[in-house]
Amino acid sequence: MAAVEVLNICKSFPGVKALDDVSISVERGEVHAIVGENGAGKSTLMKILGGLFDMDSGKVLINGKECEIKSISDSVKAGISVIYQELNLMPALTVAENIYVSDLPGRFGSVSYRELNRRTKELIDSLKLDIKPASMVDKLSVSQRQMVEILKALSHNSEIIIMDEPTAALNTQEVEMLYEIIRKLKSDGKTIIYISHRLREVFDLSDRVSVLRDGQYVGTKPISELDENMLVSMMVGRDISQLYKYEMGGLGETVMEVEGLGKEGVFSDVSFTLRAGEIVGMAGLMGCGREDIAKAIYGLRRTDAGSITVNGKPAAIRRPSDAIKSGIGFVTEDRKDSGIFALMTVRENITINVLRAISRLRIISAAKERELLGKFTRSMNMRYSGETQRIMNLSGGNQQKFVLARPLAAECKVLILCEPTRGIDVGAKAEIYRLLSDLSAQGCAILVISSELPEIMSICHRTLVVYLGKVTGNISHEEMDENLIMRCAAGEEIYFSEGVRA
């Protein structure tokens, strides 16, 4: 008997049919992955199971019995817990208070903190985690907060645990820890529904995988019968070889030169060049300082030493507006919190950096806004229902395209990208890669900070590697391999290219 069955589920939003007659069966005690491009309907289906959305039609069966889920409490009573990509914790409360906030032990209106902390410690020990019940959540790392969400799910004695992009903000070591927890939950008989854009995780963890495309069910297969090419083809409806066709063009003159850049205690003596048409990667382990270097170049971090030259002219960059004036664009790694203007329209999001250029007498030209929006809609294959649609309602991949279009609208000559494909599907990734290839061919100099080594190795002319705030490697495309990059990331110095010094 299946642990969960969804039968003929339909769900529509204004102008969009998010789910169209979807049926999926998940066996008890398995890790079942659900994959698809952004907008395929994965999150909508999970929110129906979690009680956040009502379905228009269809049925949900739990252990063979029809179950009506109209609220979060209905979902919990049915034995379902959902861990969403955007963590839902209260930072001003302790770990224990967050886990048992709806079931605090005590009498006559007072909480028994001794019992609360005892229960929490028992739960923490069951997963062998290094977290204290009395720790404040706002003092925890992102990975520890992720573990607290899992503990919350277990506190309800849920038999079915849904994980939506659980590794999006985790480093390699933390991902391995999550793997171990998922395997333990499976061995304890729990059913895991796992949503991820990272196909390596799907192959590492899942027993079976179901694919959604454009709101419709494509199929379910045992993971043993699939390889990555087959799975991607099911997701996007075409062969994977069609997704990654781009070429590395020739390079032009030096556009930007960074010399001896430093910030005490964070990074030091960082020097490199970027040439027109060049895509340079920046790799390294979490916390190595690569994001801080990128943000310093854009004026989001103050520096103690060094200089930046753009097109042969010194650039005094103290704030982002200085960087924009110098022709430097920046795309943050945190699309949700510091990338999009969530409540603003798609038209407003794309033009917010160029308001002065499209205004006359301080009145913004709606015609010029529409012209810019149309230009990037066509060139970047953006999908939205209308120019006044709020950007928060777009898929992650389309949001990322708008964040990327913003500096391009300002006609930047240097583009700095932090984790440009984090949390987007394989099809949107391919579109981003093709766009970067086109920008490179047009002479844009691009710096890509990424945690995904296959991404660095496939799209970059060369990569810099950072260890404890210092550049320890400058590796050409021809010499790149994961072992070499990881050796530099661990502190070994290896240089195969011009443009950087030890």
Image (spheres, grey):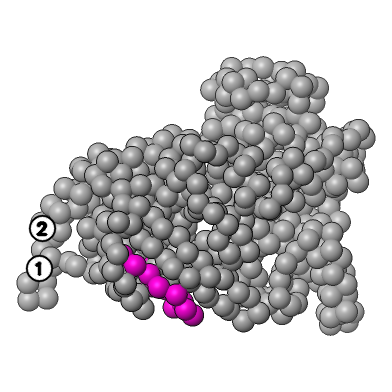
Which residue in the protein does label 2 denote? Answer: 115
- Asked if residue 61 lies in the magenta stretch, the reply is yes
Residue 181 visible in the displayed image: no
Which residue in the protein does label 1 denote? Answer: 106
Residue 131, image quadrant? top left
Classify mark 2: helix, strand or loop. Answer: helix
Residue at 84% across, 80% down: 366
The quarter of the rendered structure image containing the N terminus is bottom left
Q: Residue 230: x percent and y percent?
A: 62, 42
Residue at 38% across, 70% down: 60
Say what amino acid the circle numbered 1 marks.
Gly
Residue at 54% across, 33% down: 285
Nearer-N-terminus badge (2/1): 1
Q: Marks 2 and 1, how far apart in space?
A: 8 Å
Say what amino acid the circle numbered 2 marks.
Glu
Mark 2 vs 1: CB contact within 8 A: yes
| Towards the viewer: 29 or 172 | 29
Q: Residue 74: x percent and y percent?
A: 30, 74
Q: Above or below — where is 279 with respect to 88?
A: above
Residue range corresponding to the magenta coloring: 50-62
| Towards the viewer: 234 or 106 | 234
- Asked if residue 206 lies in the magenta stretch, the reply is no
| Towards the viewer: 365 or 315 | 365
Residue at 28% across, 69% down: 65
Q: Residue 357: x percent and y percent?
A: 87, 69
Classify mark 1: helix, strand or loop. Answer: strand
Is 344 on the left-hand or right-hand side of 118?
Answer: right
Which of the numbered marks, if any, corresponds to residue 378?
Answer: none
Q: Residue 343: x percent and y percent?
A: 61, 75
Neighbourhood count class around disc 1 (C-alpha, 10 Å): few under 14, some 14–19, many 20 upward: few
